[in-house]
Amino acid sequence: MATRIHGDLTAAEDTDTGTDRGIADGTGAAVRVRGLTRAFGSRAVLDGLDLTIAPGEFVALLGRSGSGKSTLLRVLGGFDDEVTGEVLVARRRAVVFQEPRLLPWTRVLANVILGLKGPGAAERGRAALEEVGLGGRERSWPVTLSGGEAQRVALARALVREPDLVMLDEPFGALDALTRIRMHALLHELCTRHQPAVLFVTHDVDEAVLLADRILVLSEGRLSFEASVELAAPRLRTDPAFAALRSRLLAELGVRELADATH
């Protein structure tokens, strides 16, 4: 099923049990945006933006600070209704933020199934925790979790709802380098298994190339560059094709690599 957003956003409904994996107007897309504009005062952060995401597609969104990445995610997530244009979004959707946003006064399992209804909610929550490597931690308090573990709980909370669209806003930005590597592998595994459409907002070019099917660059409120990622698995940073795509994306972002900057 779909949510139509045209100045009046409708929140996702966890009780939706429809089987459609795209939007219901025959386009077959998980996200379809046409002419989206969001202004703050006289400044248009999103300026007539068009975007389509297919069911099961992993799209990474890059952009410099202030380019509108998080604003776009808030609009698609139903958190910002001061927009013009047409936005169609899969109704069953979930958002993962940079901060896990766990409720500290309730245990891990209760955080995962927050808002879920029905007698099978607890079982679904336990299964989701098992998937993210936290089986047996159902009764732990959030304060006892490491940063990586807390973000695993956030992923479980998103996926337990069986969303057709998952939006992630710099989800690994606060984690150390080794934990980020583990989380990349986990996210890839989960998305391969569940096949949601994904919009992954990041500042990290390597992260985008490692994970995405398609990479977009947002600049001055519009999509200024698009690249399909056609790299053999496993994707390795030492692959010349990986390095070439990385360099192209950095150039699109206005960043000079160290080797170039020293000449």
Image (cartoon, helix red, strand yellow):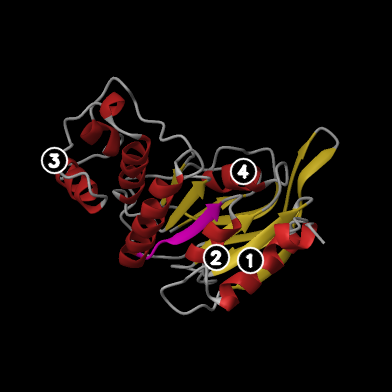
Q: Percent position (x, y) of residue 95?
A: 46, 45
Q: Nearer the viewer, residue 156 or 75?
A: 156
Q: Looking at the picture, how far across and down is residue 70, in whole percent?
A: 61, 43
First along the sequence among labels 4 and 1 = 4
When the figure is inspected, residue 230 is found, relative to residue 112, above or below; the finding is below
Which mark's residue is nearer the viewer, 2 or 3?
A: 2
Which of discs 3 and 1 lies nearer the camera? The answer is: 1
Callout 3 touching callout 1 (CB < 8 Å) = no
Discs 4, 1 touching: Cβ within 8 Å = no
Amino acid on which the number 1 mark rests in the picture:
Arg
Position of residue 69 relative to residue 212, above or below, is above
* Circles 2 and 1: CB atoms closer than 8 Å: yes
SS class of the residue under badge 2? helix
Q: Dividing the picture into quarters, in which one does residue 33 lie?
A: bottom right
Drawn side of residue 133 relative to residue 167, left or right: left
Label 3 secondary element: loop
Reading the chain from its start, which is encountered first: label 2 or label 1? Answer: 2
- Give the residue number, with chain letter if any, for mark 2: 209
Label 4, on which residue?
A: 70
Query: Which amino acid is tagged 4?
Result: Ser
Q: CA distance from mark 4 to mark 2?
A: 19 Å
Q: Secondary structure at mark 1?
A: helix
Residues marked 4 and 2 touching at CB (< 8 Å): no
